[in-house]
Image (spheres, helix red, strand yellow):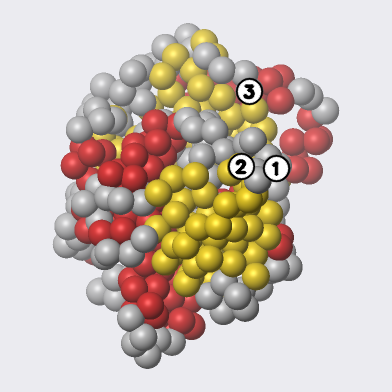
Amino acid sequence: MSKREISSDVVVIGAGPAGSIAAASLAQKGYSVSIVEKTPFPRFVIGESLLPRCNELLSRNGMLDAVKNAGYMIKHGAAFEGNHKLEKYDFSENIGQTYGSSYQVKREEFDQLLLDEAVKFGANLYKETEVVGFDPESSKVMAIDKNGDKIEFQTKFTVDASGYGRVLPRLLDLDAPSELEIRDAVFTRIKEDIRPEDGTDGYIYIFIHGNNDGWIWTIPFSDGTTSVGVVCTNDYFNSYGLSNEEFFDKIISETPGAKERFSNAKKVVPVGKVDGYSANVKAMHGKNYCLVGNATEFLDPVFSSGVTLALESGDRAAMVIDKTLKGEDVDWNVEYVDYMMKGINVFREFVNAWYDGRLQKVFFAPFKQEKIKRSISSILGGYVWDDHNLFVKNPKDLLNAVIGQIEQAS
């Protein structure tokens, strides 16, 4: 067993979207960057639906052209169906944001593409290498490659973008329980679903199951396959006493909109399950390190916020790291934590309102002011940091006020 010592300005743990955009940004700023990734690429990941805000972040970091040229299904909006009601949100009908569409992507392809872009910009990739230690005082990262050889990185700053691996939260005892109820996702990919012919074939469709007992995502890809997943509490899943595939088939058959869309569908991959995906941390940064993407907090897949928050946090962290390494005065709590939590809290309130039923009242109301619908479309597009949107300033109070108006009118 040999040992190598490598000097690098920044070490990025994990090569998902958060890690790749952070690495690309810092490499373009002239820093030496090392990406350390444990899992062989390409690898399957759920969370395949992007939001328009992603386009803005990718463009800022010189990565959007590669995504545009990849031939992904264009996602123009989101549709919600339940109790025989259907509501569609066109992302271009927002409150003046730059982008009004995004993409539906297979993550094994998308993540590889972003990683390739980061390497193209100068980041060094250490494949199939696992980080096993981190000393924030000396700013050293210890890793072992696939051959069992040790690598010690002497770095100025470490970015944990390890996602579900949660490397630094485990090594530094940063894990914390999520405030959200723990839910499961049971998912597969299918072909030959019946897609809408009204121009919304590229939308993500969300079907509400039962009395808001769960919901089903439907993410179409340009090759004709579709990602489909059922999200519910673990207790609800267990109440059926079925296997993953039996449960998936049962929920589809009991949900009218999904049953119709998938009446001719055939599974192309086995049904999988992710248990209890919501997560949180005690701190998002510390001496010589920060956490980005799902290594910080993963909320819920209902509004496709995962990749958006990953890209946003990776991009934002790179900006603050740049200032830090230049010796400028930096308040990480204000410039990184508070900034990220502003958007996370907007998404969190919408997630809470989805599960307690308030948001469905708004979505399926017989009327909505044009400004309200555009503001909601902006939130669904990932623009959760735009203070021009009243839902960003005070999401809970405004949602409740809108619900009050709807109930009063009815």
- SS assignment at label 3: loop
| Residue under the point 60% across and 75% down | 138
- In the image, residue 175 lies at what x, y percent? 70, 64
Q: Identify the residue under disc 2.
A: 145
| Residue under the point 71% across and 63% down | 171
Task: State the residue lying farthest toward the bottom.
Answer: 329
On the question of residue 408 being in view, the answer is no
- Closer to us: 296 or 348: 296
- Disc 3 to disc 1, how far (Cα)? 40 Å
- SS assignment at label 2: strand
- Give the quadrant of the N terminus: top right
Task: State the residue lying farthest toward the front.
Answer: 2
- In the image, residue 84 lies at what x, y percent? 46, 34
The amino acid type found where label 1 is placed reads: Met
- SS assignment at label 1: loop
Q: Identify the residue under disc 1.
A: 1
Label 3 vs 2, first from the N-terminus: 2
- Disc 3 to disc 2, how far (Cα)? 31 Å
- In the image, residue 59 lies at what x, y percent? 21, 53
- Disc 1 to disc 2, how far (Cα)? 10 Å
Label 3 vs 1, first from the N-terminus: 1
Q: Nearer the viewer, mark 3 or mark 2?
A: 2
The amino acid type found where label 2 is placed reads: Asp
